[in-house]
Image (cartoon, rainbow, N blue to C red):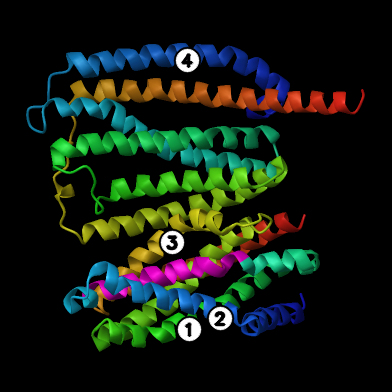
């Protein structure tokens, strides 16, 4: 399937159908899970009460932003090794969405942290630090790409950076965990219990599923826009060349 | 692979930095200037300075590694040396590693040697100063290597200083953490070993990626 889709024309035909379907499915699933999570699920009596409803946005965003970085590195690797143009188009599309999702994760985490931990921000929580570093990895990737002149250079440099980044992610994670384990901060009291009740878990997983669809649709939309831009550039060049 | 170009690249990097004058003075001046500003920003309480001092110097070392990185590969790109180096397989990675090492010797090591002096001014205890110097020396290599990857990636970008900083800083984090913990533990913990491990990792991983990035710049 992947080799089939690496042809831009087939990709355009596929994504033309896939984008509206993914948007529709994602919106329905996400909206349903939010309705269930925000209104129907009882407030959590043990920890924080109504604040648990933030989980249905915050936790999927945390999973997604990590997944998106892996996706960015994977697409970069595919482009670097096999030079499938679409892989670079994908990497380019993933970066801003990943940056937005890390930001969403940090902001919703802060909003959740204020009532549960009593503070907006903690330097010794490993999860906050990992997501923050992830945010800067995305920002660095975007900054590098936009600084380089030609698309080919931007693609190569971006691919190298994304691959170095993914190699470093385990070390960053490890160092941040060590950092946190030496500080006896309030992060020990976590908002989520050890085993989550099914009544919370089901809407959470559906919210995740819905957001996967929405994110995929957004990536495909950006990829389509990029392909069309390239086609337009080519047409413009041909016209300027007098053909 | 001939060792001659590697040796010459190393020598040239050293000579350029010495001959340029400002090449050596710039990071030292930056480090010293940062250190001088610290008591004025934090207050001159000696207890505070002694606690905060090693961390502040650690930060100053990380930042001063970024100050001069912009120039490391750009000159080679402009005078065409890079085009010659990429002709041979693997040569460029080794040359990049050697150049970064030379760069560390010129603009990182002086800061390590300056540490006792600044440490005395900050009234950092002598035994902490010794640990701090070892940490600065080891971690500095790692800073310069990751910074070198960022510098190689942006070798073809004019005025890349801030770009290099934005790209490199996330990679500095593990070294930063292991180093500051190692100074706090003062030999009693395992963070110094983690620092060593992460520096060795950087030594193994950064050069091939620098090589790949420089190949791109030479194209």
Disc on the earlier residue, 1 or 3: 1
Element assignment for label 1: helix
| A24 in relation to A86, above or below | above
Mark 3 surroundings: few (<14), some (14-19) or many (≥20) residues within 10 A? many
Gap between marks 3 and 4 measured at Cα: 39 Å
Gap between marks 4 and 1 measured at Cα: 58 Å
To which quarter of the image does residue B87 belong?
Answer: bottom right
Determine whether, in the image, residue B77 is placed left or right of residue A64.
right
User: Mark 2 near mark 1, Cβ–Cβ under 8 Å?
Assistant: yes
Q: Mark 4 points at which residue?
A: A23
Q: Which chain carries label 2?
A: B
Query: Which residue is at a point 26% across and 79% down the rendered structure image?
Result: B186
Q: Name the residue under label 1.
A: B110
Per the rendering, the mark at residue B24 is 2
Image position, residue A134 (x, y; %): 42, 46
User: Mark 4 near mark 2, Cβ–Cβ under 8 Å?
Assistant: no
Gap between marks 2 and 3 measured at Cα: 23 Å
Q: Mark 4 lies on which chain?
A: A
Magenta stretch holds residue A25: no
Determine whether, in the image, residue B180 is placed left or right of residue A92.
left
| Label 2 vs label 1, nearer the camera | 2
The stretch of residues the image draws in magenta is B51-70
| Quarter of the image with the N terminus of chain A in it | top right
Do we see residue A193 in this rendering?
A: no
Callout 1 and callout 3 share a chain? yes
User: Mark 2 near mark 3, Cβ–Cβ under 8 Å?
Assistant: no
Image position, residue A154 (x, y; %): 66, 45
Gap between marks 1 and 3 measured at Cα: 20 Å
| A36 in relation to A224, above or below | above
Q: Mark 3 points at which residue?
A: B172
């Amino acid at each position: 399937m992947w080799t089939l889709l690496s042809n831009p024309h087939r990709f355009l035909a596929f994504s033309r159908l896939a984008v509206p379907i993914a948007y529709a499915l994602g919106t329905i699933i996400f909206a349903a899970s939010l309705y269930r999570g925000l209104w129907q699920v009882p407030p959590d009596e043990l920890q924080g009460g109504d604040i648990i409803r933030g989980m249905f946005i915050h936790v999927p965003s945390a999973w997604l932003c990590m997944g998106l970085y892996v996706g960015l590195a994977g697409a970069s690797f595919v482009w670097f090794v096999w030079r499938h143009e679409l892989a670079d188009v994908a990497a380019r599309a993933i970066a801003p969405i990943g940056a937005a999702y890390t930001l969403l994760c940090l902001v919703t985490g802060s909003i959740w942290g204020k009532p549960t931990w009593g503070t907006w921000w903690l330097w010794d929580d490993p999860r906050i630090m990992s997501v923050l570093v992830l945010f800067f990895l995305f920002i660095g990737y975007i900054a590098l790409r936009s600084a380089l002149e030609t698309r080919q250079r931007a693609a190569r440099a971006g691919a190298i950076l994304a691959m170095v980044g993914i190699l470093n992610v385990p070390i960053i994670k490890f160092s941040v965990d060590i950092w946190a384990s030496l500080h006896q901060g309030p992060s020990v009291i976590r908002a989520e219990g050890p085993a989550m009740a099914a009544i919370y878990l089901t809407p959470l997983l559906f919210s995740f599923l819905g957001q996967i669809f929405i994110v995929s649709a957004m990536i495909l939309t950006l990829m389509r826009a990029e392909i069309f831009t390239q086609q337009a550039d080519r047409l413009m060049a041909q016209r300027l060349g007098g053909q | 692979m001939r060792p001659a170009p590697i040796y010459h690249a190393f020598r040239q990097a050293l000579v350029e930095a010495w001959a340029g004058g400002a090449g050596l003075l710039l990071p030292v001046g930056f480090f010293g200037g940062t250190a001088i500003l610290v008591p004025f920003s934090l207050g001159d309480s000696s207890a505070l300075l002694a606690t905060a001092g090693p961390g502040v110097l650690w930060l100053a070392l990380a930042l001063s590694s970024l100050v001069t990185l912009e120039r490391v590969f750009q000159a080679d790109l402009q005078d065409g040396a890079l085009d010659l180096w990429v002709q041979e397989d693997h040569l460029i990675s080794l040359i990049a590693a050697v150049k970064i090492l030379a760069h560390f010797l010129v603009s990182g090591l002086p800061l390590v040697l300056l540490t006792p002096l600044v440490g005395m001014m900050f009234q950092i205890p002598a035994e902490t100063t010794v640990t701090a110097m070892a940490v600065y020396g080891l971690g500095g290599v790692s800073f310069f290597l990751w910074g070198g990857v960022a510098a190689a990636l942006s070798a073809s970008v004019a005025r890349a200083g801030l770009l290099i900083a934005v790209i490199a800083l996330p990679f500095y984090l593990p070294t930063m953490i292991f180093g500051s913990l190692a100074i706090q533990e003062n030999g009693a913990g395992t963070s110094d070993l983690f620092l060593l491990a992460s520096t060795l990792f950087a030594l193994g991983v950064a050069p091939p990626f620098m090589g790949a990035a420089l190949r791109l710049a030479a194209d």
